[in-house]
Amino acid sequence: MCHTLRPHSKLVKLVAWLWVALCTAGWGATHANEPVGELELKAAYIFNFIQFIEWPDSEGDSAQEMSLCVSPFSPLKRPLSALEGKPAGKGRMLRVRLLEPGNLRQCRVVVLNNMDVEPALRALRTLPAAHGVLTVSDELTFVNPEIVIALAQRDGRIVFGISPDAASKAGLTISSRLLRLARAGK
């Protein structure tokens, strides 16, 4: 299931809204007149995905924070770090951390790239079922059934696929609105 950005699509409007919100909040004020780059657009997608997902309740969760862990090797590290402190739904603020094996239990969103997929997935397998971690891949060169959302650039467009099975195994509930957007690009 992939979604392709098309003019006038709901997701384009959603991403445009996010971009305007980030610029007016000071995140991109100095770059407001520049075109949105691929990495910033992918970061906006990830931020929006968070808004459309329900996590299971967990004793270790902070009532005020939503932790997003990003690979130290990821080109998305900088644009995701710029989202630090933004509202992530249900009164939580987004906290961006570097992905380390020791802090995986504190991550609600894990953004992976090719270099660290296998070690991160091995660590995730040690967590209990329905662990509540959203895995997002960026430019994976292979398909992995444990990844919930896969982002990629194809023919100059950002596309994404969602694995409902991986989401279910992680204990996540994905909004039907987001699932429809992913299915729209088949």
Image (tube, grey):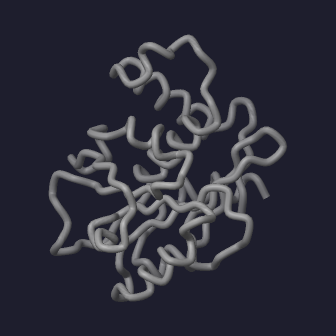
91 lies left or right of 36: left
Question: Residue 33 location, x and y as percent?
Answer: 56, 11
Residue drawn at 63 percent across, 20 percent down: 35
Left or right, 70 with reference to 158: left
Nearest the camera: 106 or 25? 106
Q: Position of residue 12 (x, y in %)?
A: 62, 34
Relative to 5, 119 lies left or right: left
Quadrant in which the N terminus is drawn: bottom right
On the image, which quarter does residue 127 sit in? Answer: bottom left
| Above or below 54: residue 132 | below
Please say if 12 is above or below 95: above
Q: Is residue 130 left or right of residue 61?
A: right
Residue at 61% x, 71% y is 163
Q: Residue furthest right?
A: 155
Quarter of the C terminus within the rendering: bottom right
Task: Give the image location of residue 173, x and y in percent.
Answer: 43, 69
Residue at 55% across, 35% down = 40
Q: What is the number of callouts on the image?
A: 0
- Residue 46's place in the image compared with 100, above or below, is above
Residue 12 vertical position relative to residue 45 in the rendered view, above or below: above
Please report the residue visible at 79 percent of the width from the left and 38 percent of the height from the top: 156
